[in-house]
Image (tube, rainbow, N blue to C red):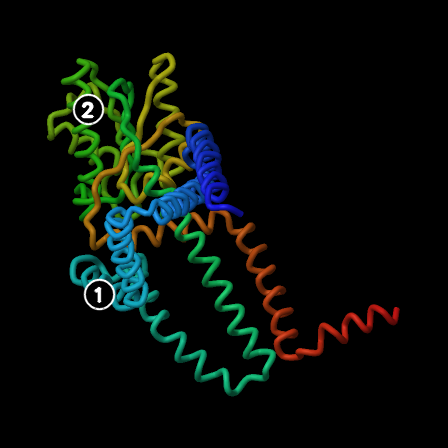
């Protein structure tokens, strides 16, 4: 294949993948396969761009782009090799600033697992038969690749979902609850969500002279003395939102119910063709949008900023929740990996197995 033909193929593939991704993303931003489509576009674009630069015979352009590229690759490789220590460092920061709950310990457990598992594997492998040693190596490798693939795909979808700048023409702004402090006080994390909604409300009023109704959504937990929605409404009113432009939704117990009961309130308002957005923290927007779609609420989300030290645990929780939502598909793939790696182990442990198998078939 000539260079010109190769470049034509690469740029054509880039345009095709870009078009497919654009149409898919425009149709539904909550689909996980958008991440796959975007990465097909991204890596075909990078391949086409790199090939064009390398065949340009422009030394300044080649070195000017090649050196930063090598630096980026080196930085990513360094982060990969240091990931366990970075996770443990994050766990230490979280434990200093937050409660020592399971949800806040995910980076600790993952960091320890990454460090310890290779030693455990090396310790037990000499005591296993050839088949089991090979299977353990194959299964752990393929499972890790599968988990990393979907985590990267989820991160892509999460980042893409942040690329949303809503028009200031909304009738309703739904703010999702996140638990109260001391039973009746808005936490800093929940306050960030309400503040983000207030900022949008104020900008819309200033630019369009069009006030929106805030729906503060959250029921009362077992350790709370008031419903979250009521505490959130009091917070919004105290920060300048008129009381008649706030509604407390106090029935919901989870994100799906936030969306479901908020939709009921919007439907009961009598507003025709209501325009709605929801507000949560940035790490939660993508999964919350999935629940909005399931509840039939036509709304996209905007995210409040989250403290950097809190993000790794939060993103991992969201990823696990996404995996659980699609547990049947992932269990089917896990079973397929189990069977495939067992077959590989048989072949690796018995090099003559394949030839003997075909001889057996010939004899039938």
**Which residue was labeled with disc 2?**
201
What's the mark number on residue 89?
1
**What is the crowding at mark 2: few (fewer than 14 residues within 10 Å), some, or many (at least 20)?**
many
Q: Could you tell me how many numbered marks the image carries? A: 2
**What is the crowding at mark 1: few (fewer than 14 residues within 10 Å), some, or many (at least 20)?**
some
Task: Say whether residue 25 is visible.
Answer: yes
SS under mark 2: helix
Q: Residue at x 17, y 42 (%)?
A: 185
Q: Nearer the viewer, residue 155 or 266?
A: 155
- Left or right of 39: which side holds 221? left
Task: Say whether residue 293 is visible.
Answer: no
Residue 353 placement (x, y as % from top left): 71, 76
Dots 1, 2 in contact, CB < 8 A: no
Residue 336 placement (x, y as % from top left): 60, 59
Q: Is residue 130 above or below residue 109?
A: below
Residue 289 placement (x, y as % from top left): 38, 35
Q: Quadrant of the C terminus?
A: bottom right
């Amino acid at each position: 294949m000539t260079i010109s033909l190769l470049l034509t193929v690469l740029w054509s593939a880039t345009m095709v993948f870009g078009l497919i991704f654009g149409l898919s993303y425009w149709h539904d931003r909550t689909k996980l396969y958008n991440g796959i489509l975007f990465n097909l576009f991204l890596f075909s674009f990078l391949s086409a761009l790199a090939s064009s630069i390398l065949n340009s015979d422009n030394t300044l352009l080649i070195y000017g782009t090649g050196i930063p590229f090598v630096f980026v690759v080196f930085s990513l490789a360094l982060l990969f090799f240091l990931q366990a220590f970075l996770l443990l460092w994050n766990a230490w920061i979280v434990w200093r600033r937050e409660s020592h709950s399971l949800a806040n310990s995910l980076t600790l457990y993952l960091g320890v697992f990454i460090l310890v598992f290779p030693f455990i594997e090396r310790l037990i492998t000499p005591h296993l038969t050839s088949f089991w040693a090979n299977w353990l190596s194959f299964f752990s490798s393929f499972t890790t690749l599968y988990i990393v693939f979907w985590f990267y795909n989820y991160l892509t979808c999460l980042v893409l979902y942040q690329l949303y700048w809503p028009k200031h023409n909304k009738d309703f702004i739904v703010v999702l609850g996140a638990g109260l402090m001391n039973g009746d006080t808005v936490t800093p994390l929940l306050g960030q969500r309400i503040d983000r909604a207030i900022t949008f409300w104020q900008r819309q009023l200033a630019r369009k002279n069009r006030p929106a109704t805030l729906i503060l959504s959250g029921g009362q937990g077992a350790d709370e003395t008031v419903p979250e929605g009521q505490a959130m409404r009091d917070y919004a009113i105290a920060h300048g939102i008129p009381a008649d432009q706030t509604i407390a939704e106090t029935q919901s117990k989870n994100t799906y119910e936030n969306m479901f009961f908020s939709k009921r309130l919007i439907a009961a308002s009598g507003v025709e063709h209501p325009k709605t957005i929801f507000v949560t923290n940035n790490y939660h927007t993508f999964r919350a949008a999935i629940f909005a779609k399931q509840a039939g609420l036509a709304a996209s989300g905007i995210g409040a900023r989250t403290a950097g030290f809190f993000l790794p645990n939060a993103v991992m929780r969201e990823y696990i929740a996404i995996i659980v939502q699609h547990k049947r598909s992932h269990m089917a793939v896990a079973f397929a990996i189990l069977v495939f790696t067992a077959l590989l182990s048989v072949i690796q442990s018995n090099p003559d197995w394949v030839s003997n198998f075909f001889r057996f078939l010939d004899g039938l």
